[in-house]
Image: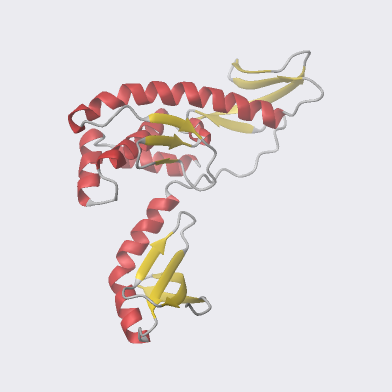
């Protein structure tokens, strides 16, 4: 039986870690960091405040590392209005939007602009979202095929690629080997797209963010930090 959860905080260096605390009939302390960077702590019923704080200080570097990892995947592009002159990203480049009425629906890059031709009963937002998704499916598949041979020595199976809108992640993978990518990633530079795909493929070899995981990522893509930073800067 658990008590009502409370919101607590812990100061570690220059950072303040806020966490949801609850108590349950269990033997060990559980700490979980979620993709939205929230932290949940579940403590045994007999845990003293001193013991709890000591354990949390020991785990603070890990908690912060997990939060920073999740933050690097957060799509942070501000809401778009889909009007003429507004800029939209595609493969790391900014394109000015041009919306025109037409007899048929079409989206294309034309003379350095992102041109949306649309009927009266359709929205520019829906047309552009479909265009991004179509482009993402093609580019992600091509990039995956290019990168996969780099993992030949690790005997991983050809992963199934799925495109799925995710509010707080650029990519993820399942234990069964499915790689899931956010269609919004098509707005990032090509190198950043490769970084996210490599990151997920590394998880098929090492499931957690261990030293071995980062060593493999470094081996496959020595300049991954640059492309991770570009991804964060772009959005």
Residue 99, x across and y down, in percent: 72, 24
**Residue nearest the viewer, comparing 122 with 89:** 122
Identify the coloring.
Answer: secondary structure
Q: Residue furthest top?
A: 103
Task: Determine whether 5 is above or below 105 in the image.
Answer: below
Going 76% across and 26% down the picture, which residue do you hit?
Answer: 122
Q: Residue furthest right?
A: 120
- Asked if residue 9 is positioned above or below residue 141 in the image, the reply reads below
> Left of 144 or right of it: where is 167?
right
**Relative to residue 178, is residue 149 drawn left or right?**
left
Residue visible at 49% across and 25% down?
A: 137
Q: Is residue 200 left or right of residue 218?
A: right
| Depth order, front residue of 194/207 | 207
* Residue 202, position as x, y percentages in the image: 28, 39
Look at the picture and state if 14 lies above or below 215: below
**Does residue 16 appear anywhere in the picture?**
no
Rendered view: 222 above or below 121 = below
- Which quadrant of the view contains residue 79? top right
Q: Is residue 144 visible?
A: yes
Instruction: Identify which residue is drawn at 67% across, 26% down.
Output: 127
Q: Name the one closer to the observer, 99 or 170.
A: 170
Image spot of residue 165 (x, y percent): 54, 39
Q: Is residue 202 left or right of residue 196?
A: left
How many marks can you see? 0
Residue 25 quadrant: bottom left
State the residue lying farthest toward the left.
153
């Amino acid at each position: 039986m658990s008590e009502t959860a409370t919101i607590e905080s812990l100061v570690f260096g220059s950072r303040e870690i806020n966490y949801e605390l609850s108590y349950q009939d269990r033997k060990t302390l559980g700490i979980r960091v979620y993709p939205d960077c929230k932290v949940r702590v579940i403590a045994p019923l007999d845990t003293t405040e001193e013991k709890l704080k000591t354990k949390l200080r020991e785990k603070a570097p890990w908690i912060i590392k997990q939060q920073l990892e999740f933050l690097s995947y957060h799509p942070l592009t501000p809401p778009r209005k889909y009007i003429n002159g507004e800029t939209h990203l595609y493969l790391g480049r900014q394109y000015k939007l041009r919306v025109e009425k037409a007899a048929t629906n079409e989206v294309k890059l034309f003379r350095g602009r992102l041109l949306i031709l649309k009927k009266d009963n359709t929205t520019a937002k829906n047309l552009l979202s479909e265009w991004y998704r179509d482009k993402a499916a093609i580019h992600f598949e091509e990039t995956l095929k290019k990168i996969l041979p780099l993992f030949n020595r690790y005997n991983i199976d050809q992963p199934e690629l799925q495109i799925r809108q995710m509010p707080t992640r650029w990519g993820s993978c399942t234990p069964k080997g499915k790689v899931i990518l956010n269609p919004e990633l098509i707005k990032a530079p090509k190198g950043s797209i490769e970084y996210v795909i490599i990151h997920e493929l590394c998880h098929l070899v090492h499931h957690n963010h261990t030293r071995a995981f980062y060593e493999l990522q470094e081996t496959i893509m020595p300049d991954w930090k640059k492309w991770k930073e570009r991804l964060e800067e772009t959005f």
